[in-house]
Image (cartoon, helix red, strand yellow):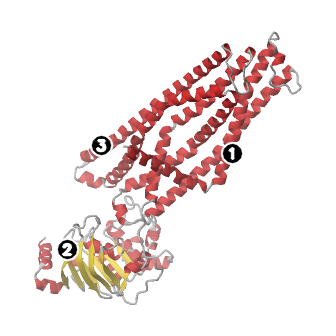
Amino acid sequence: MNNKFDNKKEKKTHTLKRLWRYYSVEKVKFFLVIFLIIIGVAANIGGTYLLPKVLSNVVFSVNPSIKAQLFYPIEWGLSKEGAIWVGFSLVTILYIIYSVALFFSNIILVKISQDVGYRVRKDAFDKIQNVPLSFLDTKSNGDLTSRLTNDIDVMVTLMSQNSMQIFQSVISMMGVLIAIFIISPIISLILIGSLLLLYSVVIVLIKKAQPFFKSQQIAMGQINGISEEYISGYKVVSAFRYENKSIEMFSKVSNELAHSSKTAENIGRTIFPYNGFISNMILVLVSLVCVVFIIYEVPFGGVFGNPEPYEAFQIVLTFIMFARQFTTPITTIMSIMNQIQLGVVGISRAFEIIDAESESDSESNEELILNSTSVEFENIVFSYDKMNPNKKILKDVSFKAKPGTMNAIVGPTGSGKTTIISLLTRFYDLDSGRILIDRKDISKYKRSEVRKNITIVLQDSFLFSKSIKENIRYGKLDATDEEIINAAKAANAWHFIQQLPDGIDTVIDQEKSGISEGQKQLISIARAFLSDAKIIILDEATSYVDTKTEKEIQQAMSRLMKSRTSFVIAHRLSTIKDADNIIVLKDGKKIEEGNHKKLMKKKGFYYNLSNSVSEE
């Protein structure tokens, strides 16, 4: 139990240190904020210390019977009335300095916090671009989005809005503590001891609330994930009458969020009135102690020593004001403890992304220059779960693709077809074996060097929410408009692009653009044409289209694959009958290889698969 608590405490400390490293980039501005807060707090304490003396002057000047001449804290050679007006003016100036200093420190701190939020978000997003797919496979899109947005925003809000209160409160407590120790060390110790005793209950409540704040952030990420899935897939939900089940699942996660939030908030709300109770009790306690000391002539120590009876008014008033200034910062910190814990949890979740292991890569800077586009798979063994050696996806798979040939990969679902492609593009690393391009082991080169020689047309024709021109330009970022148009023409996409209201400048909207799945696929093929890579991968590229569009896509693909080494994954065997080589996979093993005619003569697994498809 203690180890678990120590680990949590260590993790929180580590998170705060990490956050400080981001702030240290702006340390000049940060220390300027601290300096301004110190100036403001010092002015506030000075005004608080001076005000009772000015009020004493007023009281004693009105009542001449009191020995006022023995008690003039501020005179400066002035008359009684002059000293009073100068005192009030000085107090006013000090309070103005306090307000101005905090105003400017707050402006600077907001800018620093927003800059820090930008850098944390950028670092997290940059890391997502460099993590292995195995990391992304274990996280939902909604959870990752929540970490990049909600979690970091909570931290930015905490630092830009609440950190000012925290810094001011801490510095104020330190300044007031010094002031009251100078006035009376004895009463100061009584005050601090009482606070520690009363606030021990608050510390227990804060520790109890922390797990619920973490659960709250996790549930928020789950809600984002579920919302994204069911909103984007609403057609499937409706078609399969899944509405009630989706509502049930959303309600379950939403209820978990509500429970965690309610528990955490209730504990936080409990702290707030308790803080008020503590503050009032401290005022009562300090007043009673001061009165008892005065009645029984107990020495105060400090600057007052053993005060005269006529000084009682000033002493009690000074301590009451300082006691209020000492408890108010504590109350402020406790009241925003909910936000503090949410901020720490949120930024720690963002740091988990930043700390994720980057995709391993070769240290070689050698350029992968291809003279031939032969591709060889030698004794490939691969599993997604490295901890379970019995769950091999590919088991000693070997084959060779000759330069300029079309190579089809077929097999039942789960046989390893897509995995072959993922390994060729180095989305994952092998357990054992080698993949050679032009007799060169691709593991010896950087992933970017391998991927620049390969282009992919995926089953899901993903397009960005940009213009058609910009989507095609992803294939070659420095392409001219003429090159983009030629690529669109080669992909059989130009004829429908011209018919759109904005032509090639039409912005893609996944739901409202009016562009069909087949047309999106043609745009993807245009992007592949523009890249001019020497190795082409077509992953189920005609799965979601009608017969007419399929023919257009096949024509475009034929032109794309011409003189290039290509790999085609297809359930429709009609699209691969002309393949130069067909690799047949089953249960992670290569069981057959050859062209269509050869495999049909063999009357093996491919023969049965082809006939079953024909019967359908």
Which residue type does callout 1 highlight?
Phe
Quarter of the image containing the N terminus? Answer: top left
Cβ–Cβ under 8 Å for marks 1 and 3: no
Q: Secondary structure at mark 3?
A: helix
Query: Mark 1 vs mark 3: which is more N-terminal?
Result: 1
Give the number of the disc on residue 390: none
Q: CA distance from mark 1 to mark 3?
A: 49 Å
Rendering coords of residue 170 (x, y %): 60, 39
Query: Mark 3 vs mark 2: which is more N-terminal?
Result: 3
Give the number of the disc on residue 252: 3
How many other residues sit within 10 Å of disc 3, few (<14), some (14-19) or many (≥20)?
Answer: few
Rendering coords of residue 432 (x, y %): 29, 76
Per the image, the residue denoted by label 2 is: 411
Rendering coords of residue 506 (x, y %): 45, 66
Per the image, the residue denoted by label 1 is: 35
Which residue type does callout 3 highlight?
Lys
Q: CA distance from mark 3 to mark 2?
A: 39 Å
Q: Secondary structure at mark 2?
A: loop
User: Would residue 344 be found to the left or right of residue 63 on screen?
Assistant: left
Quarter of the image containing the C terminus? Answer: bottom left
Tell how many labels: 3
Rendering coords of residue 513 (x, y %): 39, 61
Cβ–Cβ under 8 Å for marks 1 and 2: no
Residue under the image location 28 percent in, 75 percent down: 420
User: Would residue 435 be found to the left or right of residue 13 on screen?
Assistant: left
Which residue type does callout 2 highlight?
Gly
